[in-house]
Image (cartoon, coloured by chain):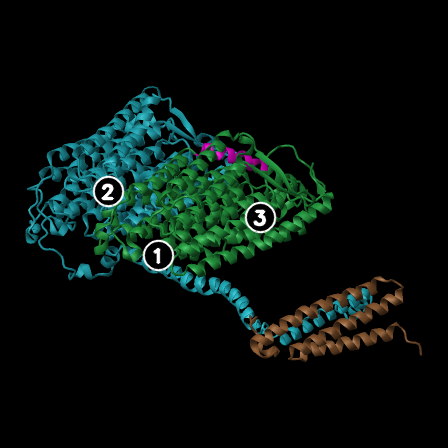
Amino acid sequence: MLDHILSILIFFPALAAIFGFMIQKDAIRAYGVSVAAIEFGLSLWLWFAFDGNVSGMQFMENLPLVPSFGINYILGVDGISLFIIVLAAFFTMIGIASLTDTPNEKNMIITLLFLQMTMVGVFAALDAIVFYVFWELSLVPMLYIIGAWGGPLRIYASVKFFLYTFAGSLVMLVGMLFMAYFYYQATGVWSFAILDWYRLILPENLQLWLFAAFFVGFAIKVPMFPFHTWLPYAHGQAPTIGSVILAAILLKMGTYAFIRFSLPLFPDASAFFMVPIAIIAIIMIIYTAMVAYAQKDVKQVVAYSSISHMGVIILGTFALNVEGISGSIFLMIAHGVVSGALFLLVGVIYDRRHTKMMDQFGGIAHVMPRYATIFGIMLMASVGMPLTINFVGEFLSLLGFYQQSHILTLLAGTAIIVGAIYMLAAYKKLFFGEVTKEENKNLKDVNKRELLALIPLSIITIWLGIYPKPVLEPINNSVEAVVQLMHNKATSDLAKERIPNLVEEVVVITKTSVQEVH
Amino acid sequence: MEKFLYIALFAPLVSSLFAALFTTTKKKTFVGIIASLLIFTAFASSSVLLAHILNNGAPIHVEMMTWMATGDLYIPFGFVVDQVSVTMMMVVTLVSTIVHIYSIGYMDHDKSFNRFFAWLSAFVFSMMILVMSDNYAGLFIGWEGVGLCSWGLIGFWFHKESATWAANEAFIMNRIADLGMLIGIFLVYWNTGTLQYDGAFEAFKTLDTATLTWIGIFLFIGAMGKSAQFPLHTWLADAMEGPTPVSALIHAATMVTAGVYLVIRSNELYDLIPHVGLFIASLGAFVALFAASMALVNRDMKRIIAYSTLSQLGYMFAAAGLGAYWVALFHLMAHAFFKALLFLGAGNVMHAMHDELDPFKMGGLKKVMKGTFIMMTLASVALAGIFPLAGFFSKDAILEAAFVEHHYIIYSVLLFTAGLTAFYSFRLVALIFHGEERYKLFGIHPHEAYKFMLVAMSPLLILAIIAGAMKGTYYEMVISVLPETEYHIHSHLVYWVMTIGTQLFVIGAVVYAYKKYADWKSVPDGSSDVEQSFMYKLLYNQYYIPYAYEEYIVKPYREISEIFWTKVDMKVVDATVDGIAGIIYGTGEKTRDMQSGNLSTMLKWMVAGTVALLSLAVVFGLAARNSDEIVAILSALGVM
Amino acid sequence: MEIGLNHYLVLSTILFAIGLVGVMKRKNLLLLFFATEILLNSVNIAFAAISHYYGDLTGQMFAFFVIAIAASEVAVGLGLLIVWFKRHGNIDLDSMTSMRG
């Protein structure tokens, strides 16, 4: 069974979703929770069976689909993707378990299970076409979630979300097709397998163009400034569960794809574009943090804060060294946990008051002390307090980037200041002061069902902040392999200089336009 | 011995978690008692460790577990107990034990009694991490941890707008400095490859001065925030919104001295870069004077003491910057004792006066509050640096250091500040305890604090009196880690003239303060000539610095944020995206007329399209066939 | 003057142009069918001529195909036309705009 665990992880929720149509309405939640729990159990088993000391792909599966064009169903995980898969399973589980008064609950749960299939598929796929299929498929359930259960502007928001990301990924598809064509030219056979592509050394000018093509797709997904405006709408209109999954998992697809595709395929271009991308990342960090500070809707604060944090992730990724990339992957998980929890927390008050406007609240720490405490923990994680999960990621990302540029890191480091400003201001508006509104005087504190989701998240937040090793070590091993690959493949002097060599011996690669690394 | 290290470290954590269990229930006195006992346990363990260090001097170094490890980076949870950290541990645990016990009385009527102890113990835990860590990353954990607890405790009464504002201000301002600290840590890592103190210090010796200077500057920026040095000082005075025991523990005795601790801990770094040290010393001297001047006219009892804290921190930095690390640490210790005592006394007064803070509205309290009166007076004597109390020994050593190092400007600034210190301390004492009972005008019936609170304060009183006597032992102990710099003024005559002169100057200031304020009659209403003068207004408004920050930093930040959101994000970025979508929609809308459904129109379009495509094909075909000629013609025309 | 390939092709082009104009201009559905017949037959002429020119029968075969298809097309088309006329009472093209976008 372990041989096919990835396929099972992908298609089990989808099958279960199809069977879900036959389940009666009042039993659907129990059904959904148990399916998601089994899936989560399987993902934990995957983690357990995963050998953290191996840097390469594990649990590989290979099934030919269109062999003449080199399109194969190839799956595999390494330390980079493993934890995002576990996180996706985890969030689907607690998301379904903590669903509150949703009309058409059955459809929602079935949609979530389909969504889970696509999410796991994206992170497990090792074939560009399979990756692309799951990448695009993931839009559909999310479109449906926003469009069917969203707020008043849901149609606008969902269409914007869909078209924007879809347009970006079409450019990416062109890039992928060209990669495969290039591979065909170089070797005489077609292949869409990412691991095959890794062996290609592309001429630098070609790398720049391909990098740009992939960049458009990934940057919109992340979302990077100035492609970010779909996100506040999507979050603003999506129901709580939609925002949670979107922030926790879907956004990570973009940053994950940078590490899976852009860095190892185009090391020279990555080094070349490092500074401009870092500047975009810094704009993301500071600018969106300031925009977040100006928001009046607490959910928008969290939405913009996501963009700000994604900036740090991008920065860590483009540090191009082990510390930075490991940090950025860890921060993906950390941000998933923390922002997911924050959206759940916003959902808690939204369920009670049906408003997310901060001026409608104030002083609710008096009436909801437990809620205030959990929110406080997540607030502190979000501002990067040491011994919480976010700090490890942020610290490593910034530390890594510091090797590349002092001044840019100094600017990016303002993340810890501006982040504190908007989060503390929002917390103050919500929780501090006297209770002024009559409706807020009798708000119920978090109930059991909500605690079911929030307590595990709080525990993870602190546990991985104190002891990140179980996650960081496998990440580190895989990242070392990626960085070494990049260094070996790099042809330009700039890239050689920026990407560290981890093994002492110097690998000389001659500068030819097309050749393979053996 | 490791056992005691862990007890000292984790007893406060246990205490905090225990108290946290009861945060949502109503007040339970036993929570406070158990928390105090656990903190006392930590104190006892620290004492055992101190005895161990005093006896054989071998530092204890443990590595609990790995924290972060990736690439070449390796950061463990490592703890070290050496002469410096054990001194800090003693100060922290002792003052916190006393403050915990005191708080049982002070927070008696507060409904969030349990929550208070959870935060307070959490603070002690963070502070212990800060001082015990054996690497910069661990220090940073404690550094941020104390910032967090300070936030929670300043904003403890979160129903008050001013308290939450001050809490956020403190947190954010500290964050600004923390960025500097973080950059300093990055610099250390990339230049030495490690964050462990011993490894890094070893590697510093091989680095060039420019790098070391940057490291020194950035680490010191971190220290400036935590120790509230100019220009990041405004949060400290505002932090007085917190409960008074918090002010005593965090904003006087321990947390604010973390910056000094950092400089002392990094002494091997700062020894290599004396020019940065001189800057630190100059800034310290400046802050000493600057803060003391603001304390002269303030009418808020707690703020006066806060400014005096600031001023004394300036002294510590002056000493540390001049390389007299042991003197700085000694002053830190002595200051912790008498300043905590002063604050706790102020807390008693506040309780008696129903949270009235203006000393002009008090007066004559010595009759009803004898114990507090004695304690505060003695603490002020110690603060003023009058023989034979603790402050004399520590402050005198700083002055000597400045004099012997030939930094006469720093010396004279510090000397002058000593006079100011004596003046404002006794202005406060005189206004509170002497003279007419002005509080009667406001219908207040003061009463002395609980007995056990006074008893709890007494160890501080004793230490404030006798700490000076420990100077010798202490010196013997710490010189094994800190540079052995003894300051002897060569001529005996000069030494005695200086010491006695300083004493006379200080006592003169005390007498002047008494003369001026001891029989104060009325509550000033802002109409007197002094209050109208420019200097008074300047000092009373804290040199208009908080105003400037509000006006030129906070407000613009808010406005720019607003513009970024409403104008840039909505009107430019998003509008561009929507505009592109709009163009596409619009094109469709315009061109839908083509699909009129009328067969003949559609056929016309079809024909037109076919013709266009055909002609394109012909043109390109011709062009491809005759490309050579075209290139030739174009190059002849100079186009290509 | 001998009649050569070019003459046939010119004839074919002229017929095609007439047919094209007819297709675009006619509003009566029946006449539209006539015009399409002219178009198809112009192509048939071209096929037959070129086939003869190259001595390859494929072109003529194609012409037969076209004739067969044209016949069936007219059969189906006329059937639809009659149904339309019965429903609406006219076969004016301008009234048939239900496919309007």
Asked if residue B378 lies left or right of residue B226, the reply is: left
Chain holding disc 1: A
What residue is drawn where x is 71% and y is 78%?
C21
Q: Which of A120/B147 is in front?
A: A120
Residue matched to label 3: A132
Q: Which of A149/A16 is in front?
A: A16
Confirm whether the magenta stretch covers residue A479. Answer: yes
What residue is drawn where x is 11% and y is 36%?
B450
- Let me know if residue B227 appears in the view: no
Q: Nearer the viewer, mark 1 or mark 2?
A: 1
What residue is drawn where x is 58% and y is 35%?
A60
Residue matched to label 2: B247
Tell me which amino acid carries mark 2: Ser
Chain drawn green in the picture: A
- Let me know if residue B184 appears in the view: yes
Report the span colored magenta: A468-481
What residue is drawn where x is 57% and y is 45%?
A131
Residue matched to label 1: A297
Q: Position of residue B351 (x, y in %)?
A: 13, 44
Q: Characterize the local packing of mark 2: few (<14), some (14-19) or many (20 or more) Cα atoms within 10 angstroms.
A: many
Quarter in which the N terminus of chain B is drawn: top left
Chain drawn brown in the picture: C
What is the count of numbered marks? 3
Tell me which amino acid carries mark 1: Asp
